[in-house]
Image: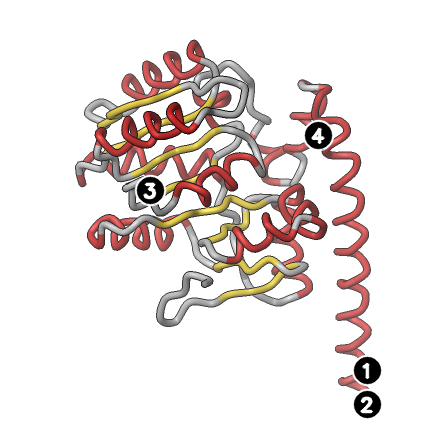
Amino acid sequence: MKIQTMGEKSIDILGVGFSIRNYQEVLQQFESWIVEGISHQVCIANVHTVITCLHDQDFRDINNRSLVSLDGLPLVWYANWVLGAAATRVCGPDLMLKCLDQGRSKGWRHFFLGGKPDVLEDLVSKMRAKYPGVEIVGWHSPPFRPLSAEEDGQLVSLINDAKADFLWVGLGAPKQEKWIDAHLSQVQVPVQVGVGAAFDFHSERVPRAPLWMQRHGLEWLFRMWNDKRLVKRYLTTNPIFLAILLRDFVLIRLLKRAVKFG
């Protein structure tokens, strides 16, 4: 069932339902979940996510059972230009930093899952230096292979024993979202979020695009230039979405004109 709250504005982009909220509204939702103590999933969606959902029914269903934010700026363009939603971007890496920072005064506890051991060590060290007093209660780097049933149970116990409020999962999409969904009933953490490359960015192992590129929807270009493994991903999803955006933008303009002069 799609998570909704009173007065929330939701939109649909190519079959994926999004919640229109800013960062502070998302943090307020997280705080209420922590008070409830019930596990929830958050999907940070970008163009790759939405296009993948077109042919991956399981992944689309997972997103539509979760709270989904508009991460990619082209999705914000679609929401605003086509749907008239007055939406803003809620980016995974930035959301993670805001939770670490603002959560200090609330005693929020964080667990990191994913990434290589040395990346996690750097991440924990840098976050503790950047946000003195932040409560990072655990981290784990799983092997790059399927876990046995015993290993999976041990991982769930490790996370639950840490009594975290946030589980940040950096396994890449859609693997991280599918892992959270499969374990949501077992992992006793109120806020569970897949954050993709955030661990690499915040450990400073991978450079992040300059702010001007982030603000103009060009972060993908910077990432592709610095990591050639992403070339296929971006060149097989971004052109498709941009073509759909252009098509729907033109259609909505034509429709408005027809109504105006009809």
- Residue carrying label 3: 186
Label placed on residue 120:
none
- Say the numbered circle drawn on residue 221: 4
The percent position of residue 214, horizontal first and vertical second, equals 59, 35
Callout 4: SS: helix
Judging by the rendered image, the residue that carries numbered circle 2 is 262
Residue type at mark 1: give it.
Answer: Ala
10 Å neighbourhood of mark 4: few (<14), some, or many (≥20)?
Answer: some
- Between marks 2 and 3 in the image, the one whose residue lies nearer the viewer: 3
**Residue name at image x 28 percent, y 19 percent:** 128
In percent of width and height, residue 232 lies at 77, 29
Q: Which mark is residue 258?
A: 1
Q: CA distance from mark 2 to mark 3?
A: 57 Å
Name which of mark 4 and mark 3 comes first in the sequence: 3
Quarter occupied by residue 248: bottom right
**Residue at 51% in and 65% down:** 10
**In front of the other: 22 or 136:** 136
Counting from the top left corner in percent of width and height, residue 91 is at 50, 41
